[in-house]
Amino acid sequence: MRAPLPALLLSLAIAVGLGGAARALEEAPEPPHQQWPFEGVFGTYDTAASQRGFQVYKEVCSVCHAVKHLAFRNLEEIGYTEDQVKGIAAQYQVTDGPNDEGQMFQRPARPSDPIPGPFPNDQAARAANNGALPPDLSLITKAREGGPDYVYAILTGFKDPPAGFKVNEGMYYNQYFAGHQIKMPPPLTQTDQLKYADGTQATVPQMSHDVVSFLSWAAEPNLNERHRIGFKVILFLIIATGVFYAAKRKIWSRIH
Amino acid sequence: MAVPPASSPASGYSRLIRWIDYRLPFVSFLEHEFTDYPTPKNLNYWWNFGSLAGIILVIMIVTGVVLAMHYTPHSDLAFDSVERMMRDVNYGWLLRYIHMNGASMFFLIVYIHLFRGLYYGSYKYPRELLWILGVVILLLMIATAFMGYVLPWGQMSYWAATVITNLFSAIPVVGNKIVTLLWGGFTVGNPTLNRFFSLHYLLPFVIVAVVGLHLLALHQHGSNNPLGIDTRGPQDTMPFHPYHTIKDSFGLCVALLVLAFFVFYAPNFFASADNYIPANPMVTPNHIVPEWYLLPYYAILRSVTFDILGIPAKLLGVVLSLGSIILLFFVPWLDTSRVRSARFRPIYRLVSWLFPIDAIALGYVGSQPPEGWVVTLGQVATFYYYFHFLILMPLLGKIERPRPLPISIGTAVLEATGGLSTAGSAERH
């Protein structure tokens, strides 16, 4: 008890360890760690990758999956200009109303509208997907153990099943999915499946990486700001801790 | 204007302050309780955690009140309203992450504070009620944290609410009625969310009130100290201000550093990924686990896997789990030793370190699926938890030979700092 600081650090380490242990264990293999530019104290999103990822989402994923927590205006945060966002929104039709005659009507989407999903409701989504419900993707990297690494692993984890493994009808083998059988057909299958606007070669790992970049931003759009403010706050607190410690020593020297 | 004589408590202040203070003695109250308030000279850094807990409580209330302005307590809207807060409310993400991680910080601090009390015997005469009020605060904190965890209405919110409220059904005769009352219906649903939100907003202010009583009881006899002997006069004490205001400020900065690290760089470290999936009554998560600070109670709950004397295992688990906290109420009388501080109790000193190790083992058990050796570890740790309080504490007081206590705090401080040369400087204050 004479050395309180090590003991405190120990208690903290224990509490931290428990927090980690509290996470549920999955049966599937641990997804391999990928390098993401948004990791670490100074990490930020790569806007070019996020824009390519939005293109992958729009041309591939959005056939089945919604991103309901995103509005078109949010796309400005990954580097699209206001006019580009207006252009993207105008490609979608949304239901508005009722108008003065009491009728609902269709109109082109505006930047303030949420990005419309592919299905009007969960039942329609199930009916179109053999009973499976494609989850909303706006929080997917936060809603799965392993986060971005896991989503990347799923996208690149489709393989031929090992000998003797029976895959049920309407299911696909995926080495990183719990139970190894997933109802989602492999979404990204071949190089140049789509043509990137910036000319990047669209390989499967490239497209997977880009769409995970986009989805990570979609799940945690304030990460850049959080990291920037956090650095200043921690710097301030380190200085304040030093100042208060010096003041404490000075004031207490009157006693000892 | 009648102004009291210059010798009154607020004598150093202007006429206006003295006029007010004569009628509403707020300034002299502050002077008495926060400036001149005598504290033992030998308090170490373990005594920082009380004021720290108080400050975290304020942080929780301030962030919580603002979050409540943007939150919608409806089962169809709650999840989306939290997401909207994270995305569209200015600094909503910051407020929510402070509130989420602040809860973990609050429990960490309070558990250290509680351990400090156990180690130095702070619950003994004449501080029994002070201790009991602390246990009341802990119970209120657990209830508040649990209901707060339900509010985002994610998968873990919903299923934690289901599992925990179902425990009350183990109570004979009235159990099911209590569960229906908690739910406001026949399943966890919108009425449950509404009442949990209401109570989650109410209970923190009840905690504030009990903290007030806790402080009132504390200031009656003053802080205990690492030697566990009474202060004998001004030579043993120092005024709260500036010595403890500055020491607590330093401690607060360190605590805020830890909190800031999690808020800004690992905000979801303590959170479950499942809670970013909206609540779905049709899909049960693989492992339903509470937040880390409730894991030991959860482990005790699940450790009873068999009926004893016709009492169903479930009821027994609930009783032992709740009992693990209720037991703390009786600690002032379970500990039969007249020596407060573990420093002078060689066996209890060792035993008091085994207790947090046992609690951590229980926490680990609570975090794991209840299979194989984990169950056995949970049972052993549960047994030891009760053994510690019900057998060791009363027994050690009788059989242990404590080391001799110092005559006074002043002499002990002098011995520690090396003789009479410092006596003069100590006397000055």
Image: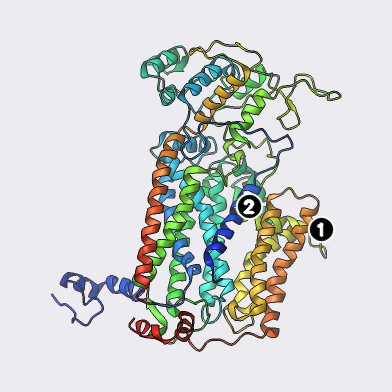
Across and down, in percent, residue A56 comes to 55, 17
Give above or below for A23 relative to B108: above
Q: Residue furthest left?
A: B1
**Looking at the rendering, in which quadrant would you find the N terminus of chain A?**
bottom right
Kind of residue at badge 1: Phe
Q: Chain of mark 2?
A: A
Q: Check residue B306 in the rendering and tell me which mark sits there, or answer none.
A: 1
Give above or below for A146 relative to B56: above
The picture quadrant where one finds residue B253 is: bottom left
At label 1, counting other C-alpha atoms closer than 10 Å, the crowd grade (few under 14, some 14-19, many 20 or more) is few
Q: Judge whether residue B69 can be spotted in this image.
A: no
Q: Residue furthest bottom?
A: B407
Residue at x 52% of width, y 25% of height: A214
Residue at x 65% of width, y 76% of height: B348
Q: Which residue is mark 2?
A: A18
Q: Is residue A220 left or right of residue B392?
A: left
